[in-house]
Amino acid sequence: MALGLGVGIFLLVNLTSCTKETARANNTNRKMQFAYAFTVKNIPAGAQVVDLWAPVPQSDARQTIANLEVKCDYPYSFETEPEYNNSILKVQAAGSLPESLNVAMNFFVTRNGYHILENQDKNSGQTTEAMRQRFLAPDRLVPIDGKVADELKNIVRDGMPPLEKARAIYDHVAGTMSYDKSGTGWGRGDAIYACDVRKGNCTDFHSLFIGMARASNIPARFVIGFPIPENANQAEIPGYHCWAEFYIDGMGWLPVDASEASKNREKWNDLFGGLDAHRVQFTVGRDIRVASMGPEAEPLNYFIYPQVRIDGKAHGEIVRHVRFSELAN
């Protein structure tokens, strides 16, 4: 079965200096065709049911998703995860099963660069009191006490406005951690690991930022998607990229990309309160519970890659192919 679903609904302090031209150069719009395909490999002979879940990107104030098409030979549906309102593709294959199973999502995306602080852009989304409280609470790997709170004492002081606190935390995380994927332990988004080792990938950087922000009574949330190469018109994308957002009353959600700032110092100011267009967002949040996985299922640490069960047991043999092609403006 190969069906299409059209999606066109919108859901809705200085450390270094940089020129205005540099700050705005990376905030252009990008229009792309995006393909997210995966193959479930080595399905055991005699298997009865394959269940697959994958995140689905949505339109919002910063990106427009259109002409979403799912290609799959088996029945599929969409569900909305209730805590963060993420959209999820659910595929179920039953009966006589092949050795491998293919699923692909194709869509068009327009991604907008923006900077809320410099452009006085207030269209950054509001929140409810329930969501505010959720984004002040700890996650399983993001505590807001212990080492995180102790480190925070050296960064912020009593009486600092929330925006100034967020900037101090951003400068500290981006300035004291190294983007380094050597060894073990990185990539889980473990704030204590980040405190202890002072290195990791984007999940580790932003887990520490989120934990410290929440410990400062600033709501903060985790956002994940895929990076788009800045100087390429088409390419295979090998892995994910994540960033964070924090909430300021009267301004809404402001983004930070501390890991990218640590690698590209010339973008340091650009990536506090703003983001370039070189990314596509897929999901928000940590410890994500997917209803159709059942109440006994462990929550997902974060959700960017497909999750597969064969006859109720987790199956990790999945090959992914993620690719984009630039479209003419």
Image: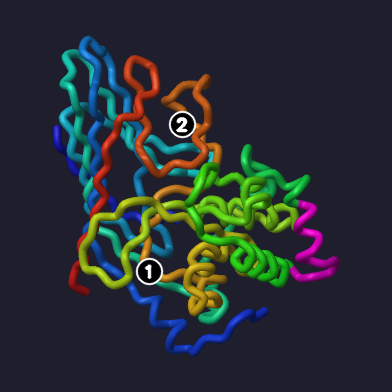
Q: Which mark is residue 290?
A: 2
Residue toward you, 175 or 85: 175
Residue toward you, 128 or 23: 23
**Could you say where residue 183 lies in the image, as x and y percent from the top left?**
51, 46
Q: Outermost residue toward the front?
A: 183
**Does the rendering let one see residue 119?**
yes
Tag 2 secondary structure: loop
* Residue 31 quadrant: bottom left
Disc 2 marks which amino acid?
Val
**Residue 208 magenta-highlighted:** no
Residue 249 lies left or right of residue 237; in this view the side is right
**Could you say where residue 209 lies in the image, as x and y percent from the top left?**
63, 57
In the image, the segment drawn in magenta is 149-161
Residue at image location 77% in from the left, 46% down from the top: 145
Residue toward you, 291 or 280: 280
Tag 1 secondary structure: loop
Q: Main secondary structure of the magenta part?
A: loop
Return the disc, 1 or 2, that comes first in the chain's sequence.
1
Marks 1 and 2, how far apart at CA: 29 Å
**Residue 151 magenta-highlighted:** yes
Q: Give the residue at mark 1.
A: 277
Disc 2 crowd rating (10 Å Cα; few below 14, some 14-19, many 20+) is many
Report the number of numbered marks. 2
In the picture, the quarter occupied by the C terminus is bottom left
**Could you say where residue 14 lies in the image, as x and y percent from the top left?**
64, 81
